[in-house]
Image (cartoon, rainbow, N blue to C red):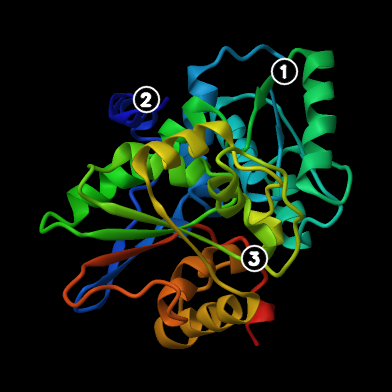
Amino acid sequence: MVDLADVRAAAKRIDGRIRRTPVLAAGPDLWFKLEFLQHAGSFKTRGMMNRILAGPVSEAGVIAASGGNAGLAAAYAARELGYPAEVYVPVTAPAVKVAKLGKLGARVVQEGREYAEAYAAAVVRAAETGALFCHAYDDPEMVAGNGTVGLELLSQLPGGFDTVLVAVGGGGLLGGVLAGLSENVRIVGVEPPGCRALHAALEAGEPVDVPVSGIAADSLGARRIGNVGFGLAVASGIDSVLVDDSAIIEARRRLWDEYRIVVEHGTAAAYAALLGGAYRPAPGERVVVLLCGANTDPATLA
């Protein structure tokens, strides 16, 4: 299990290699954590940097499988640390993410139509080459690195906050935030019905496979919640809510129209929980919406 000590160790390890992303006051009791401004466009750079620095890494470099964001984080971190990177993505990965992977110097391999298929191919390749396999979310170092965003929040909002809304895919960000924040902060996981790996696992009492579909599948489309994130979720007794695709699209549009914030659909899910009423704060409840990724095509905002 990842704990606060692991998150603090990760913060020391990656210090100076990641951005301290800002917090935007969006209302009297509402803040946006602008983690989409992180290197490579998502929170995953924190976790991936920690994973690679924890090593060991051979001359074969690193291999990752991703719907896009974890691959971008792996490519960026590997480049900055001087290692080659090979990234497996499904053929359905957004073109904007695939193109950026190439710009970051990674060798890109497109395999299968879902993350799970790209993952299986990447595992085989890592075994063949001896490269360090970097899981997109179900890895203790990855989760601990992601949790550093929680430590940042504590320092940026010294007056405190009550609740953090977190979009959930494989559980790597959720687990990190749970480990990095104190027990008196409520963490709420947010998922679309077509990417409900956490919701289904909580209902079943264990991680289970789920079908993947919908507008946010490219970033939240894990077929099964990770063991690390699920263990932390159960131990914390977190809340989990579902938001439909129309609410996600509206939240993404509102972020652009009202704040000039451009994020991907998966990221907008966290805000959709507020706008659509899936999560209703109590009067005076201080809420942080974690906006975690922006690797998207701005043209789709129209």
Element assignment for label 2: helix
What residue sits 54% from the left and 24% below the top?
Answer: 52
Residue at figure coordinates x 59%, y 51% from the top left: 169
The three-letter code of the residue at mark 2 reads Arg
| Foreground of the two, 204 or 199 | 204
Disc nearer the start of the sequence (3/1): 1
- Cβ atoms at labels 3 and 1 below 8 Å apart: no
Front of the two marks 2 and 3: 3
User: Is 104 or 198 nearer to us in this picture?
Assistant: 198
- Mark 3 is surrounded, within 10 Å at the Cα level, by few (under 14), some (14 to 19) or many (20 or more) other residues, namely some
The type of residue carrying mark 3 is Pro
- Residue farthest toward the left in the current orientation of the protein: 159
Q: Are marks 2 and 3 in contact (CB under 8 Å)?
A: no
Dot label at residue 13:
2
Which residue is disc 3 drawn over? 193
Cα–Cα span, label 2 and label 1: 21 Å
Numbered disc 3: secondary structure: helix
**Disc 1: which residue:** 131
Cα gap from disc 2 to disc 3, whole angstroms: 36 Å
Q: Using a 10 Å C-alpha cutoff, classify the residue at mark 2 as few (fewer than 14 neighbours), some (14 to 19) or many (20 or more).
A: some
Mark earlier in primary sequence (2, 1)? 2
